């Protein structure tokens, strides 16, 4: 049986880094679906597509080729043969990803790719609708979260380390706006499923979260 682990959670919860660490410990791949939506958003911006025009964004998504590759440094996200990984972590692209992710046609295209990948390869898949839509039958379902203030603090510190001088208050405001958009979209709104284990990392450090999740996986899979 292929081991698939589904992980959902809000922006800034540390899903990508936590998921990558857990996947490495388990010897399986990590699929960052958020990066795929970011890549679509960036591609649409570059193409001059109006992000508020659902039909135009959906048509653009269907016209491009979105792929992922895995390297020693983690997932590389590729659109039409161009590696966009190093360009998709800006606040502008974050909001673009949240916007395009509201559209049913876009989500349908991305989910199809994600399901094809997970059907043949053991992997931990993280995103916003993994437990609900992408891997509804996964043996392990997780919802990783933390308080908005803590998520904003972590993101702000990361930005500071990169030389970004954006004030903490602005980071928190943007994060709350992203939460509002993700949780209230018409298609697959962000929410924990009834069978997902909620992991609140507000009072935990990185290593503690990883170990806690590994314990959940062991319990759920009897490994």
Image (tube, rainbow, N blue to C red):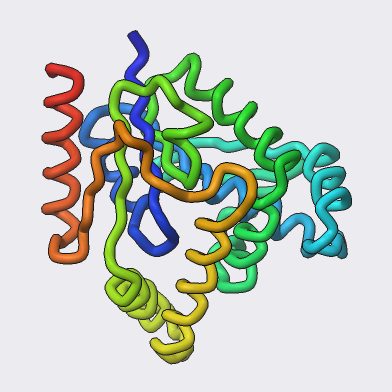
Check the image and report above or below for 5 versus 183.
above
- Image quadrant occupied by the N terminus: top left
- Is 62 positioned to the left or the right of 150 in the image? right
Q: Is residue 190 left or right of residue 110?
A: left
Q: What residue is shown at x 66% (from left), y 52% (from top)?
A: 102
Query: Residue 197: percent from the left, percent from the top?
Result: 24, 39
Instruction: Determine the residue positioned at 32% across, 45% down.
Output: 143
Say if 132 sits above or below 39 in the image. Answer: above
Choose top left, top right, bottom left or bottom right for residue 218: top left
Whether residue 81 can be seen here: no
- The image quarter in which residue 222 lies: top left
Nearer-the-camera pick, 70 or 89: 89
In the shown orientation, is residue 120 left or right of residue 209? right
Q: Nearer the viewer, residue 154 or 150?
A: 150
Instruction: Give coordinates of residue 97: x percent, y percent.
Output: 63, 58
Q: Is residue 189 visible?
A: yes
Q: Position of residue 200 (x, y in %)?
A: 22, 55
State which quarter of the image contains the C terminus: top left
Question: Seen in the image, is 47 located left or right of residue 213?
Answer: right
Residue at 86% from the left image edge and 49% from the top image edge: 55
Q: Position of residue 41 (x, y in %)?
A: 70, 57
């Amino acid at each position: 049986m292929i081991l698939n682990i589904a992980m959902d959670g809000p922006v800034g919860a540390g899903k990508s880094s936590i998921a990558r660490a857990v996947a490495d410990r388990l010897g399986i791949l990590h699929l960052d679906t958020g990066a795929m939506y970011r890549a679509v958003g960036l591609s649409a911006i570059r193409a001059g597509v109006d992000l508020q025009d659902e039909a135009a964004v959906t048509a653009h998504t269907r016209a491009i080729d979105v792929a992922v590759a895995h390297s020693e440094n983690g997932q590389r996200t590729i659109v039409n043969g161009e590696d966009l990984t190093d360009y998709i972590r800006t606040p502008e692209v974050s909001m673009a990803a949240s916007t395009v992710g509201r559209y049913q046609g876009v989500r349908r295209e991305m989910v199809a790719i994600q399901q094809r990948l997970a059907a043949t390869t053991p992997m931990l898949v993280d995103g916003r609708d993994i437990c609900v839509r992408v891997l509804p039958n996964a043996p392990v379902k997780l919802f990783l979260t933390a308080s908005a203030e803590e998520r904003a603090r972590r993101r702000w510190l990361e930005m500071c380390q990169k030389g970004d001088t954006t004030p903490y208050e602005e980071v928190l405001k943007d994060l709350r706006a992203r939460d509002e958009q993700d949780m209230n979209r018409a298609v697959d709104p962000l929410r924990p499923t009834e069978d997902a284990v909620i992991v609140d990392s507000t009072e935990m450090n990185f290593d503690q979260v990883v170990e806690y999740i590994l314990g959940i996986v062991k319990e759920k899979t009897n490994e």
